[in-house]
Amino acid sequence: MTEELDPFRIAQEQLDAAAEIMHLDKQAHAILREPKQTVIVNIPVRMGDGNTKVFNGFRVLYNNARGPGKGGIRFHPKESISTVKALSAWMTWKCSLANIPFGGAKGGVICDPKSMTDAELESLSRGYMRAIGRFVGSRIDVPAPDVYTTPQIMAWMMDEYDKMTGHDEPGMITGKPVEIGGSAGRYDSTALGGMYVLRETAKRRKMNLKKAKVAIQGFGNAGKFAFEIADKLLGAKVVAVSDSAGGVYSESGLDFAKLSKAKEEMGSVKNFEGGKQISNDKLLELDVDVLIPAALENQITKSNADRIKADVVLELANGPVTPEADAILLERDVLDMPDFLVNSGGVIVSYFEWAQDMAGYFWTEEDVYKKLDKIVTTSFNDMMATQKKYSEAKKRISPRTAAYIIAVERVATAMKLRGWY
Ligand code: GLU
């Protein structure tokens, strides 16, 4: 991996940029540049063929000054300690910007879930929880789903934790099935939060979403629902979508129901007959109004940022735009909405889930959506106001830097009040 693309270096660089502009205290800055705790585990799993395979996993608690750690678990062949550290830092800023009472954390296991059976996945999920169990809990650090992990995986992990501790503790993990302590509205909350951001962005940019063309990279938990909501709720036209195997494009717009069916039947959107094939790289460079990277990190870099034609980039994935690319987009007046605002809907509804579990009292879907909209819209307005304030007083800053300034300030204040510096 080149220096430009090392995720944790990127996370540190983003923090440094904000720290300089906001004149962050040097001691607070030093604490915030590194994770508080890094746990590395090796998990032996008895595979279907009878042999034992060892999987490498991580759980990083970045900061817990504002509350217990919070953040998902990824199962991915390219997982690394650098990615997990970066993602745990981004979770810290995400929870702080949303002003919910959590710090930041993240977990990951290097594995290829697509090539594993359900039984193997269950053993791995339980083995991972046994390995990190002492470091998590409803008042310690609360995991959740992320790339290639599901409500079912959360259910296995919670069950393993309950067996280890001998008590029932649904608030120790979120993103669970609703039948066992999950929240109404959690499944599509990441995308829904992102669409609230899009709605607010369009208002400011005076963009008519009913006439807007949208391209989405990714068709997982985030991308798929973003497609559905952009199409049905906002009335925008989704002209391109992709997954890890490739993408599909149609000038006149793609049909969500037919495309989802094709993905289920063929395993990828790539061969969908209602459009032409397009590569992931070309999708990013389409002449659309809104580009939604909803897959993995490092998609828009200094090598393609010049060719992005979208008016608005909505970062539904974590870390899809590198700092070098961020600067180029700002220069070119492409409005780039940062990941830790755009995809905060997931963790906000995780917070609601945790609160419901702790109280043992559950809310309606309508309640969840209303409260989510309020938090996301407030964060959006806070970010835009901060961007305006700094850009007028000094040099122009990106929405991301503005969001950093708010988030870092809140964490630094919590650390100060606790006497950490
Ligand atoms: N994995 C999601 C994220 O990156 C959700 C985390 C959570 O719910 O704790 O924000």
Image (cartoon, grey):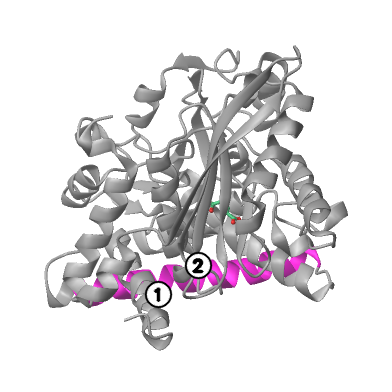
- Return the x and y of residue 377 as percentages of the image width and height: 50, 69
Residue 411 is labelled as 1
Q: Residue at x 27, y 61 (%)?
A: 15
Work out how far the residue at label 2 is from the one at label 1, CA to CA, in angstroms: 8 Å
The type of residue carrying mark 2 is Gly
As drawn, 399 above or below 117:
below
Q: Is residue 327 visible?
A: yes
Could you tell me residue 221's position as x and y percent? 62, 40
25 sits left or right of 155 in the view: left
Circle 2 crowding by C-alpha within 10 Å: few under 14, some 14–19, many from 20: many
Judged from the image, the secondary structure of the residue bearing numbered disc 1 is helix
Q: Is residue 386 magenta?
A: yes
Question: In which quadrant is the C terminus drawn?
Answer: bottom left
The residue under the point 24% across, 75% down is 27
Q: Is mark 1 within 8 Å of ligand 1?
A: no
| Chain part drawn in magenta | 364-390
Q: Position of residue 263 (x, y in %)?
A: 66, 22
**Which residue in the structure is indicated by mark 2?**
103
Of residue 398 and residue 96, the one placed in the foreground of this image is 96
Judging depth in this view, the residue of 406 and 278 nearest the camera is 406
Compared across the picture, whether 180 is left or right of 4 comes to: right
Of the numbered discs 2 and 1, the one sitting upstream in the chain is 2
Asked if residue 301 can be seen in this view, the reply is: no
> What amino acid is at disc 1?
Val
